[in-house]
Amino acid sequence: MRARSIRGTGAVAAAASLAVAASACSAPGDGKDAGGAKDSAVVGIAYEPDTLSPLLGYGKDGNSKIFDGLLTHDADMKLKPALAAALPKVGDDGKTYTFKLREGVKFSDGKPFTSKDVVFTYETILDKKTNNAAKTELDAVKDVEAKGDDTVVFHLKYPYAPFAERTVLPIAPEHIAGKQDVNTGEFTTKPVGTGPYKLVKWSKGEKLTFRANPGYWGGAPKVKNFTMAIIKDDDIRATRLDAGELDGAILPPNLAAKYKNDGDKKSYAAQTFDYRVVTLPTGNKVAGDTAVRRALDTGVDRKAMVESILDGAGKEAYGPVPTDSPWFTKGTERKHDLAAAKKILDKAGWKPGKDGIREKDGVKATFPLWYLTGDKLRQDHALAYASDAKKLGIKVEVQAGTWEVIEPRMPKDAVLAGGGSPADPDFDQYTLLKSSLAGDGFNNMAHYDNPKVDKALDEARESGDHAERQAAYDTIQRELVKNPGYTFLTHIDHLYVVDKRFGDLTTQTEPHDHGLASGPWWNVEDWQPKQ
């Protein structure tokens, strides 16, 4: 799943919900941004964004480097003011949010930031012509009103409980973005914001180069030059970290393990809502069969995946909500039980053939499962899933490809995908499960269609009462036991390795999207590198 939804995932998400466009492997740069410079940092990430425009979903969950939202998150994921001078005043039984704006803020081109830019940003995102797959997260917004240059009032259709979380969304300058085509204009690759960094260059498939914004309202960053090297292959990322070309990188567990006792580097593990999941498309005669779905849900060995693939850096997943979240519905855990899984298939008429592969009504129990080329975690999950399926008499054909290859196959073929959002269950589950979003880019990749789930998603979204919302999400999680359109496998911790010269760093609870906006560099503007 990708940044716009559950692909490999924020979703730009909604971007998401649900990781991102495939990118070519390359060296971090031309030598000018090599790791080790006192006021510079070069980090290796696995994916790059589809766009750098917040109007199309970039940075919707915060930490965009180039932009700021009205609010932002601290290390504990608590909301705090950014472009707003204070947290919003909420009125009209949760249907109005009033923000007083911070004084003296300017965009990096020197032009002042005002309430008109806030109104422009939200109205543009909600415009039907704007290609932003995350706009459903703003469905509650009735209108946005500017009162003078320093006050903004959001009027909601209903008391959308997590609305304040949506105001971390980056604000775009009307005087630039408003004069271009929102979907294809230059702003999508050469943005201007109020954030701590200015984009120097985006070399697609290679790197994103940033320079500190000397006029940043929060103070000029000490790390003057910041580069994100886009290296999709895990092994190559580790090799370049060893070679000193990178100051930090995100790595899978098996590659991160060797740095635990490194004298020059420090390892960080970030807790996440990030899950790995197999989509079971309704349009596939085998993967879309309820009995097959239930058998796979019972027959996969999640614990073994956590231990062998993640080296214990994660937990078993039974749905989009982690088991240690207060939103998780107790009793929806699925015990690994091969015998029970086989009985489900036997009862439904899926009988073993001479080759051991089950058949029903002339249809063999086989389907393809795609994963993103170069992503070792997805590859390992896909192979383990296929191995477990084989024990049930189901043949899963594992194949690798780029998103360009995978996307057109999603209505019929299974995909090893990812997703997860810590802020609120609505942000991930709505785009993951809502039937009306099936076929909308990377939203609802399985084309899942369950009227009870649709109803509960709407009830949870439109209620301001926590107990009512909890009951609705309980319903959704129980329905996913009865008819799992996805096989959730693991929730994974994100592992990072960073040069110790940057001191003791912090991580946040992270969404599916990682490396770009998350990781120890979520607040690189606050780093104090040792001289």
Image (cartoon, rainbow, N blue to C red):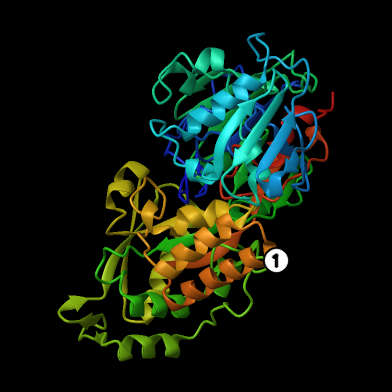
Q: Secondary structure at mark 1?
A: loop
Q: Quadrant of the C terminus?
A: top right
Classify 180 as above or below 525.
Answer: above
- In the picture provided, is 460 more to the left or to the right than 375? right
Q: Residue furthest top?
A: 110
Residue closer to the observer: 103 or 266: 103
Residue closer to the observer: 333 or 473: 473
Classify 368 as above or below 203.
Answer: below
Classify mark 1: residues with Cα within 10 Å, few (<14), some (14-19) or many (20+): few
Residue 376: percent from left, percent from top: 48, 53
Q: Which residue is mark 1?
A: 326
- In the picture provided, is 340 more to the left or to the right than 333? left
Residue 451: percent from left, percent from top: 40, 67
Is residue 464 something that shows in the picture? yes
Residue 189: percent from left, percent from top: 47, 21
Classify 341 as above or below 314.
Answer: below
